[in-house]
Amino acid sequence: MPKKTETRPLNAKQPKKRKSRALGINPVGRPPMFKTAEELQAKVDEYFISGRNVRTIVEGRGASQKTSKVALVTITGLTLYLGFCCRDSFYDMEKLPKFTHTIKTARSRVENYYEELAQVNSNPAGAIFALKNMGWKDKVETEHSGGVILHNPQLKT
């Protein structure tokens, strides 16, 4: 026997979409990864202390050549280190009041890294690009005050 399908008029209300399990609202799906803000904060701190990838940078040539190790801090790196599959899941967790402060602080720490990198790097283009993706703007706004008087001698008043 064929299954009946429900038909609705075009102006009928659409069913409400389910909220994410990550937000602790939907009873089905993957359980939340972190139960408390303290647990999440501990993992975030672990990333910033030892969980980052490190890149070796070579500067100069010949006798003046220097090598240094630079820690790579990224939102995606933090997201993956915390066990999320994508940044969207990480950002969704920020909507939960108990995790808001922890997530915002972690994002600010990554932003601070890029800000410092833009100041000390000889080519800050990558850091500037990352900051723009975090909401920074690269424009100058000029505000003028005073009036403008237009004078046209052909017009008679």
Image (cartoon, rainbow, N blue to C red):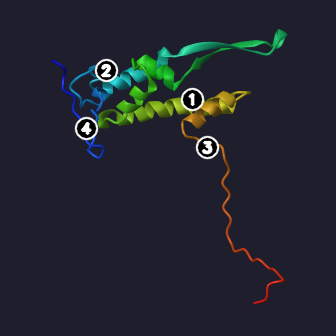
Cα distance in 3D space between marks 4 and 2? 28 Å
The residues bearing labels 4 and 3 have C-alpha atoms spaced at a distance of 39 Å
**Label 4 crowd (10 A; few <14 / some 14-19 / many >=20):** few
Pointer 2 residue: 33
For disc 1, the marked residue is 113
Of pointers 1 and 2, the one earlier in the residue sequence: 2
- Identify the secondary structure beneath mark 2: loop
Residue 70 x %, y %: 62, 17
Among the 4 quarters of the image, the one containing residue 96 = top left
Q: Are marks 4 and 3 in contact (CB under 8 Å)?
A: no
Residue 44: percent from left, percent from top: 42, 23
Image coords of residue 129 (percent x, y): 63, 32
Dot 3 or dot 2: first in sequence order is 2
Nearest the camera: 46 or 5? Answer: 5
Q: Which residue is mark 3?
A: 137
- Residue pointed to by mark 4: 15
Q: Looking at the image, is 2 positioned above or below residue 125?
A: above
Specify which label sits upstream in the sequence, 4 or 1: 4
- Please name the amino acid that badge 1 sits on: Tyr
Q: Amino acid at mark 3?
A: Lys
- Residue 15 placement: quadrant: top left
Residue at the limit of the structure toward the front, as seen here: 1
Picture residue at 49% right of the left edge, 34% below the top: 108
Label 4, label 1: how far apart the Cα atoms are: 44 Å
Q: Is residue 48 visible?
A: no
Secondary structure of the residue carrying numbered label 1:
helix
Looking at the image, tell me whether mark 1 or mark 3 is earlier in sequence order: 1
Task: Specify the farthest residue to the bottom.
Answer: 157
Q: Amino acid at mark 4?
A: Pro
